[in-house]
Amino acid sequence: MSEVRLRDIIERLGGELIGDPETRIDSIEPLEAATPTAISFLANPLYAKQLAASSAACVIVAPPFRDAAAARGATIVSADPYLYFARLTQWWAERTQPRQAPAIHASAVVDPAARIGARVAIGAFAVIEAGAVIGDDAGIGAHAVVGAGCTIGAATRLGTRVTIARATIGARGIVHSGVVIGADGFGFAPDRGRWEKIEQLGRVVIGDDVEIGANTCIDRGALGDTVIGDGVKIDNLVQIGHNVRIGAHTAIAGCVGIAGSTTIGAHCMIGGGAGITGHVTIADHVVVGGATQISRSIAKAGFYSGTFPFDDNASWEKNAATLRNLHALRERVRALEKKSP
Amino acid sequence: MSEVRLRDIIERLGGELIGDPETRIDSIEPLEAATPTAISFLANPLYAKQLAASSAACVIVAPPFRDAAAARGATIVSADPYLYFARLTQWWAERTQPRQAPAIHASAVVDPAARIGARVAIGAFAVIEAGAVIGDDAGIGAHAVVGAGCTIGAATRLGTRVTIARATIGARGIVHSGVVIGADGFGFAPDRGRWEKIEQLGRVVIGDDVEIGANTCIDRGALGDTVIGDGVKIDNLVQIGHNVRIGAHTAIAGCVGIAGSTTIGAHCMIGGGAGITGHVTIADHVVVGGATQISRSIAKAGFYSGTFPFDDNASWEKNAATLRNLHALRERVRALEKKSP
Amino acid sequence: MSEVRLRDIIERLGGELIGDPETRIDSIEPLEAATPTAISFLANPLYAKQLAASSAACVIVAPPFRDAAAARGATIVSADPYLYFARLTQWWAERTQPRQAPAIHASAVVDPAARIGARVAIGAFAVIEAGAVIGDDAGIGAHAVVGAGCTIGAATRLGTRVTIARATIGARGIVHSGVVIGADGFGFAPDRGRWEKIEQLGRVVIGDDVEIGANTCIDRGALGDTVIGDGVKIDNLVQIGHNVRIGAHTAIAGCVGIAGSTTIGAHCMIGGGAGITGHVTIADHVVVGGATQISRSIAKAGFYSGTFPFDDNASWEKNAATLRNLHALRERVRALEKKSP
């Protein structure tokens, strides 16, 4: 691990330093587990009690914790310590996690009719088809396939074996390994007990600054496009059906499924394992709890939940059995109410 | 986009045309969003009110809507407009979405002991192992791997980086990118706190006209085979365990999990995110609602559901807390009933 | 299929043989479906009634079933027939399912600064980056990518297109096709309506004897590592978030999602489709039922469940509607109790 001094951090990221600017830092660590050469942060006031005991060389804190932190040792005061920490990790990664070198691997198959920008990295065995356009500074992982006519924005990075077909992705995106963008949506017309395929004629259009997690799938539109807004963040193993539209800066955690033709607003947060049915509309600033199933449109910002509370198996079985007759129980309460004086 | 005339469509797909056969069509679009050179369709009577206002050059309708549609402009009358639309998309895709050229890419590794049919397309970096048999007109995507002894039926298409091992797939199938067919089922015997692997000795046998969505997994049988019937349609990110059997023409939406040794009938529809436990049997013509967990066999055709209704978080919390004591609440109602005169 | 004699099985795996040691066996089959040249087993006493009618050449049974089995035909008596069966499948697979030959395919891209052990197999188009260490007898599938500095333990096998980055995996592991180990965890700091990326600086550390199912994802830690203990078995399409820790010999079925920074004990079993929220701790020897959502820590070993019981759709709708007013129903019962004499 490479080492920096607190002075370097302040020069790069700002903030007020209390303590010796020559202090050497060789890692970023959580408050309670920090070693004496680490920098740490206090983002959640609930953890304030860990501050005094932390062995960190320096702690990033918000102004209200300035004195408590300074009493302990070197301190960086920042209005938003969590954001400061995020930017510190970015700088750290730049220094310690080398990016793909801007070179086209000899084994890659790049169609002569593809347009490749400046300083593009293309990994081993990648395939870039005719008419594809790869923006400047983009990175294409080993075994990735950029299909005919697809556009990859400037500085966007595709991980290993990402498949992109009939799609456009904006600038500064990150697409992790195994993602499939632009596969067929799931559409069939019934025909005397068989399914007749509805060919999917649309595309996927993805904005700038979008991150897409490993093995996630985003299907292309049937008619018209599937659209992912700017700044959307999607975790691993998420399924996004055809003609879904997701508003800007919405975050979607792992294992979520969003069925076809649903529209999700901007600045939403969808918890892990949640499901959203097809053909509904979710307003901006909606938060959906983990594993919640959204079965109709939501017109109002807010926090929505709906999971069965877990319990020891025996208690759950008794409650679940009663639940299967809940409507009848309500009728019994009604009958009692009628009789009641 | 290439252009056709209404005359071309009628010649290809039949139906009765009301209006000028020379009308030019350059896209297929939904009724409410159609542009003046698009063809659209009215499949669901609920959308009939959109008919009059649609700007489409031509609308495909069922006989009961003939007059209303004709009053608006060019009309194709068909007994099943949705099926007509499906076939129209197929023709459209044939014309506008080029298939892989029937050629073996120079970089592909094809074992001399594999048997490759006529007019087969094999993409860059694909691997075809010894004893594999690839049917006529089949297409194998870039980075796909067809394992030793596997059979791919005529005209079946594998997307990029599909892995097929110890499996057979019939004719006219479509397997999307990232699918894994024939990986080990999940089987272990407990041995003093450790898990001893049960090697999976069976295969996967897939019928004709099966479509399998991106990143879906179908495990091979432990003893005996995992069997997917003719005409089955499976969406993305679906997990099908070892020794599962799925009857013909069943459709399975995204993110479904089906545990080992379960048998699902023919003509079933399994909603997105549903789960089906192992070792159960589901009758033909069963419909399972999205996210529903099927925990025992279903002997009768019908529509089955079971999800917790979502609500604003505060309401859900109150109801969920009460649910944890539902059995006790029933006892209280019983006690009241006993006391009640 | 190759053939063995009962004598060979006993020599290899022990147990007491009743019957002719020269009896030839050409397959392993389930009791009720066994053909006359198959060996079968009775592991679950519930299936004891199938014993008499089975056509198997030989049945493996526990001591209590010795006489019933011997009355039927050749019998192997073993203290744990299921474990015996597991070991038999292992021997069978060794004989009938050829492993990758210990050779490096000419097309593989192996960095000169990678360290490759003895008898290693590396498939077509695999990529081994600088500083990677591949243990003796390991197998790397076609299109697999072992990132810079990763370690693959002795005799560990990676399937096709496995991606491993910033990770270490122990000995005798099995990683199935499409697995992504070491992608970025899902971490962002909010910044005026946008998400600022928290670079993920940790690694994934996986113990010995771990099996990981197809298309499963294990993210690397944000700070510190994601840790998977020895002997852990993970099925297909499982999502394991950053900084999760899983204790030794825990088994996780398909489609499970485990959110970031959660700790799961040793010897747990997590049912298919279950979800576990972030930042909780699950004790050793906890069993979580399929599709159950664990929303808080579990301090005590036991069996925990929580799924909505499915029903025919009409009944479910009535009960679900009532459930949305369950808290009010409880208040009504309270009111009745107060009035009740």
Image: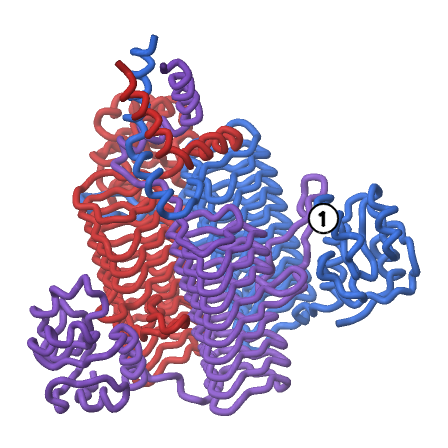
Chain colours: A blue, B red, C purple
Which residue type carries mark 1? Tyr
Q: In this view, does A328 lie to the left or right of C212?
A: left
Q: In which quarter of the image is the C terminus of chain C?
A: top left
In the rendered image, residue C64, in percent from the top left (x then y), is placed at: 18, 72
Q: Can residue B2 be seen in this view?
A: yes
- Give how far across and how far down residue C192 sits, in percent: 72, 40
> Residue A8 appears at what percent x and percent y?
87, 61
Tell which of A304 and A113 is nearer to you.
A304
> Which of the two residues, A335 or C337, is positioned nearer the viewer here?
C337
Above or below residue C138? Residue A310 is: above
Q: How many marks?
A: 1
Placement of A42 over or under B41, stated as above or below: below
* Picture residue at 38% right of the left edge, 25% below the top: B50
Residue A302, x across and y down, in percent:
56, 31
- Residue under circle 1? A47
Is residue B34 visible to us here? no
In this picture, is A130 found above or below C119?
A: above
Residue A171 lies left or right of residue C36; in this view the side is right
Closer to the camera in the image, A156 or C185: C185
Determine the image quadrant of residue B204.
Answer: bottom left
List the single residue furthest toward the top: A341
Chain where mark 1 sits: A
The residue at 75%/72% (across/down) is A1
Q: Is residue A327 above or below residue B239?
A: above
Depth check, front residue: A333 or A260: A333
Binning the other alpha carbons within 10 Å of mark 1 as few (below 14), some (14 to 19) or many (20 upward) gives few
Q: Which quadrant would residue C4 be assigned to in this image?
A: bottom left
